[in-house]
Image: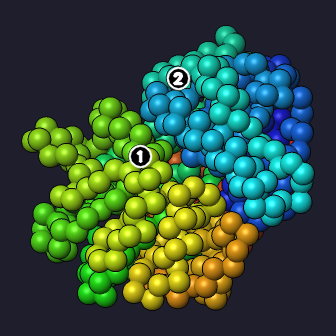
Amino acid sequence: MLQLTFFGATGTVTGSRFLLEAESKKLLIDCGLFQGLKKYRLRNWDPFPISPSDIDLVFLTHAHIDHTGYLPRLCKQGFGGKVHCTYATYDLCEILLRDSGHLQEEDAHWANKKGYSKHRPALPLYTVEDAEKALAQFEPRHYGEDLFITDTLRVKFKDAGHILGSSFVDVKLMQNGGATRFVFSGDLGRAGRPILRDPVQAFEVDYLILESTYGNRLHDNKSPEEDLARVINDSVERGGVLVIPAFAVGRTQDLLYTIRELEEKKEIPSIPVYVDSPMAINATGVFEKRKGYYDLTAKVLELNGIRIFQPEQISFCRHRDQSKALNEINGSAIIISASGMVTGGRILHHLRFRLRRPQDTVLFIGYQAEGTRGRTILEGKPTVKIHGQEISVRANIEKISGFSAHADYNEILAWLIGFNRPPKKTFIVHGEPSSSVSLAEKIQKRLGWDVVVPEFKESFTLS
């Protein structure tokens, strides 16, 4: 029996968890945290819908927490199998999962100290120690390497072009002289962006599980580099600090790469750039370690001795006192800090201080999920709650969509056109309801494919 069940990323962008049952094996593709609205975050505290000890293997499409961040809790609840991913994903998970455990502990500490939790005492979802135990179960693989689960069940990773090490999970079941193939897209990247290779083309797909984060939107045709230059120059003219909430993996490195290029082209002045995120600093180290994942342009730059992530006045703030000292800056500077959706981390302290200052600017360069502080600020609300306190929003608020690592709907459709035949069924996941429905309608109308938008915990028996 072939069965596919959706335990997350349905009706929401986060919480990727898909269970494929084949050849008497239970394979969990992605094991992410729910983020955003409280009704979704509360699912992180629920027992996993099936016994974790019944799951044979976990496969991770990439390292972002909404695809990996539930893993320490799954292991804590009894999952004892191997976790497979690419080598770069493993390197990044070493950073992200430990950091996530630290943030869980820190959030519980702050809630107990400030008394803004309903629970007494507030407890972390999991700890750094739980994350360490989960990491011991990883067994990384190379792109394109065949991993045979049984004699007739094969899994491999293919480059998705989203972040370093990101992949499609390609599952092939061989029976009765034929084959059935599943492709789990994870997050589909974009062609022509700096640093990473473009997404590879998929073929011979029977069942496609496809993300829809930007299923109802197009990225701005305007160059994100031009937009970033404008925002930086405007900030310099005001004499304020530019604060950029950025995902530690992918977006921070894109920013550093672009700022360096803009400086070299003399399109912006050289000003101090502070990366205030130990996780982002460590992730940048992984990028420098895994240069084999770069596209040709980035490799040539490195070959010519250019440090592609090093603007002229770069400073890396590892320690808390260095982070606190950034509050003393009154002139022009750029602070890049995590998390990208303002759900936790040092960015909260910077926004708590900077949002009230009209001379300062906050720039969002990534998707802000429903229910996150980032979405609240972008929607123009006059205040936002940080550490239990309502903070007035007086700073200049800017947004650039072109840095997104997610394909928009035209880019998704272009990738789908490359399939040599329609899948038997395409499942649309990993999007807010309007995005998923919109993408489903576009695929049905333009390609004529059989498309389904699954519900939470919905299960499908497949031929």
Residue visible at 62% across and 19% down?
136
Name the kind of residue labelled 1 in the image: Arg
- Is residue 255 placed above or below 391 in the rendered structure? above
The residue that disc 2 covers is: 140
The residue that disc 1 covers is: 318
Q: Report if residue 177 is visible in the image.
A: no
State the image coordinates of residue 324 (x, y, percent, origin top left): 46, 60
Query: For the N terminus, which image quadrant?
Result: top right
Residue visible at 63% across and 26% down?
132
Instruction: Mark 2 and mark 1 in contact? Answer it, CB < 8 Å.
Output: no
Helix, strand or loop for disc 1? loop
Residue 268 lies in what quarter of the image? Answer: bottom left
Observer-nearest of 324 and 401: 324
Query: For the C terminus, which image quadrant?
Result: top right
Q: Residue furthest left?
A: 304
Helix, strand or loop for disc 2? loop
Residue visible at 63% across and 41% down?
102
- Is residue 339 placed above or below 232 in the rendered structure? above
State the image coordinates of residue 121 (x, y, percent, origin top left): 86, 48
